[in-house]
Amino acid sequence: MTDDYEKEEEKFINTLGATASLKRLIGDVAKEKKSFATVVVSVVTTATALAFYPLAIGYAVNAMANRDMYGVIFYGLIFLVLYLIQMVANRFRVIHTTKISQMAVKGLRDRSFRSIHSVPISFFSIVKSGFLISRITNDAETIGDFLTFQIPQVISGFSAVILSIVIMLYLDPTLTLYALVILPVLSIFTLSLQGKVRENYLKTRKTIAAITGNLAENINSIRSIKAFNVETYVNSRFDSLNTDNLDANIKASRLSSAYGAVIRVLEFIGISIVIYEGVIELQLGLITIGTLVSFIFYVQEFFDPVTQLSQLYNSYQSSIVGAGRIYGIIDSPKEIIPEGSVPVDTFGTSLELKNVTFSYGEDTALNDVNLTISNREKVGIVGHTGAGKTTLSNLMLKLYLPQKGEILLDTNDTKNILTSRYRDIIIPVLQEPFLFRGTLYENIRIAKKDASNEEIEKLAGEFGLEKIFSRLPDGLKTDAGELGRNLSEGQKQAIAILRALIRGPQVLIMDEPTSNIDPFSEKDIFASLEKFSENRTLILITHRFSMISLVDRIVVIDQGKIIENGDFDTLMEKKGMFYSMYNIVMGSSA
């Protein structure tokens, strides 16, 4: 089930490969130029200190062998100075790598968040919110840890290895060749495992995303879970996903631990080769005991960065996979706004749909629809469930673009109108308004940031909605709760209407505005809409006819086509679908 979802998700989010992800991540990190330069200097300083440690120890050993106490003290002090230099350099490295990594993570999260506000609405019909949350939070956090702690250590270690080889060649070229003989084996072994390790850690990121997605779904639907007594079923599903994540992590850890064990074996072989050749040269008088000791330390330094890499390989692979997934979100195809977008500020004469066709995959939702709505006209759009009413609303809101035909605002094709300006003219009141945690003032104010509490209260009073909020103990200061769980359906809908009204829309589209509310709230909302629509355009989408008296004209949609169009009396006299629906609904309510 998860694999099928991932195939569908890849249509919108294409996870980048390791090389491409690493290149882009380096580019993002390098933007902090001053901190980046400080890190480079501190890493080079640390590497230089590491490279001269073994040399200082070797000279100290020679001094001890020669009973030269002044030499022992001198080289001991050099060792101490090198240690202090490394300590100071490390402090600067940690401070600035933390700044760089956190700025990089912030940038990735900001760009990801902006990206999901720019993608087409169809993106969210496929991609699960929990998976997006996991990518933007969990994956970004993994990248932050990797950049802060692991990469600088490994880079510093490998830089020290390069300097160490130079020093070793100076001390004894022959012994250096023996010391390096194990490196090709080490490199081949590391490269051979890279693809497999990445595959395993990609699986761990996907399984944790599946867990996050499942958690988000279950928490949001906790009332339904309890109401239908399906706790056992949802617990079983979560346990299955959690087990998949456990198995993926164990598999990845086994491979990583095996890698580390082999690295240690290679390290001991390398040291043994150096000791064997070193003892021969020592007996021949070609080197001193101090030089042999230095070489043993240098061979260990070869393997320390690789060992660190093996220990941190989990984080490296997980971070690169995570970066690829985040860049996938950033690179997701954006909502198409054609070049030369026209800024339009007013609704002049009409909103016209000409030969509009739209499909969801192979399912046709609207077929060759023609409809003209004049300025200040009140139009009701009715039809059975699935007839195409909401699709029509989404197209008029420019949430989707027609696949055939065109939608004209006055004489301008909406494809060519600047979307942000267009959505200032046409404002929706949706069937299921989304509420954020915060006061009702704050929830209304998201539609107009500079709206004062007094302005909101005045608007609620002007349109008769203050009665709905007067039932709350703290009125508009009440906390809505997560997803508005502290409010009734009528109160939620009233907030959605105030959000729209405070924007001062020229066209208001209402999609089933009273489908879930009680008759008392419906009466108050009806009165507010009646007052609002006196000098504005109203498009009312509904299958309930209690509010149909608000409109001048009724459009009936069935199977994606307009089959009836006229005022209430005309359609009732025609005795077609509207007549049948009206009698069924009003008859059942009588």
Image: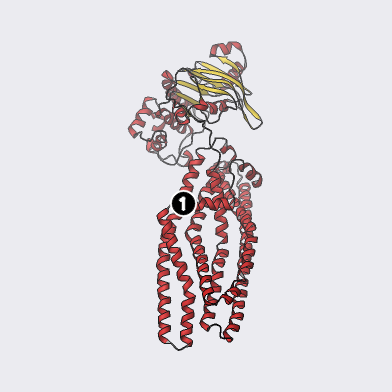
Judged from this view, the residue extending furthest toward the bottom is: 67
Q: Dividing the picture into quarters, in which one does residue 225 lie?
A: top right
| Residue located at (52% from left, 55% from top) | 142
Residue drawn where x is 54% and y is 69% of the image: 304
The location of residue 48, given as percent across then percent down, is 46, 69
Observer-nearest residue: 559 or 151? 151
Please name the residue that numbered disc 1 is placed on.
Answer: 104
Question: In the rendered image of this protein, does residue 215 appear above or below residue 161?
Answer: above
The amino acid marked with disc number 1 is Ala
Q: In the rendered image, is residue 108 in sight?
A: yes
Quarter placement of the C terminus: top right
Q: Is residue 580 left or right of residue 536?
A: right
Residue 130 visible within the image:
no
Position of residue 314 measured from the top left corner of the image (x, y, whole percent): 57, 60
- Residue in front for this viewpoint, 100 or 77: 77
Image coordinates of residue 465 in percent, x first then y, are: 40, 28
Residue 546 drawn at (x, y percent): 51, 21
Position of the N terminus by quadrant: top right
- Way the structure is coloured: secondary structure
